[in-house]
Image (spheres, rainbow, N blue to C red):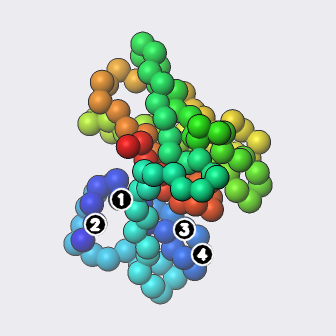
Amino acid sequence: MTEQKQIYRCNVCGNIVEVLHAGVGQLVCCGQPMELLTEKTEDVGLEKHVPTIEKVGNKAKVKVGSIPHPMEQKHYIEWIEIITDDGTCRKFLKPGDKPEAEFEITAEKIEAREYCSIHGLWKTK
Ligand SMILES: [Fe+2]
């Protein structure tokens, strides 16, 4: 059984998928069940991953890490997304980019998620 917005990863080939419509089946890739990624909300250690949102008017700027997260070839923030009651808006990043993204958003209640290529899925508290 899946739930909308859950994110699953194949630990064999690296495929990552998001559930848009929940179903009763188990997600399988490369012949084995995909891993459900859990959203972490507490930083531990030196690396900072929990996203923060600065909202000014209709703009929401999401930054990853009180100390900016590395954006290196093998270790970087792959995407940042904003989640509202109406849906999700996502921006994909590349190594060398800043670990932040800006969104036009009118909703009051917003959350942010981000995915680090090494440390996985993170969410605002
Ligand atoms: Fe990381």
- Per the image, the residue denoted by label 1 is 6
- Per the image, the residue denoted by label 3 is 15
Asked if one can make out residue 74 in the rendered structure from this viewpoint, the answer is: yes
Q: Between disc 2 and disc 4, whose residue precedes? A: 2
Rendering coords of residue 76 (x, y %): 67, 51
Crowd rating for badge 3 (residues with CA inside 10 Å; few <14, some 14–19, many 20+): few
- Per the image, the residue denoted by label 4 is 13
Dot 3 and dot 4 residues touching (CB under 8 Å): yes
Rendering coords of residue 6 (x, y %): 36, 59
- Give the distance between the C-alpha atoms of the residues marked 3 and 1, in whole angstroms: 14 Å
Crowd rating for badge 2 (residues with CA inside 10 Å; few <14, some 14–19, many 20+): some
Location of the N terminus by quadrant is bottom left
Does residue 32 sit above or below 25 in this rendering? below
Q: Tag on residue 2?
A: 2
Crowd rating for badge 4 (residues with CA inside 10 Å; few <14, some 14–19, many 20+): few
Rendering coords of residue 24 (x, y %): 22, 72
- Give the distance between the C-alpha atoms of the residues marked 2 and 4, in whole angstroms: 21 Å
User: What type is the residue that disc 2 sits on?
Assistant: Thr
- Give the distance between the C-alpha atoms of the residues marked 3 and 2, in whole angstroms: 17 Å
Q: Between disc 4 and disc 1, whose residue precedes? A: 1
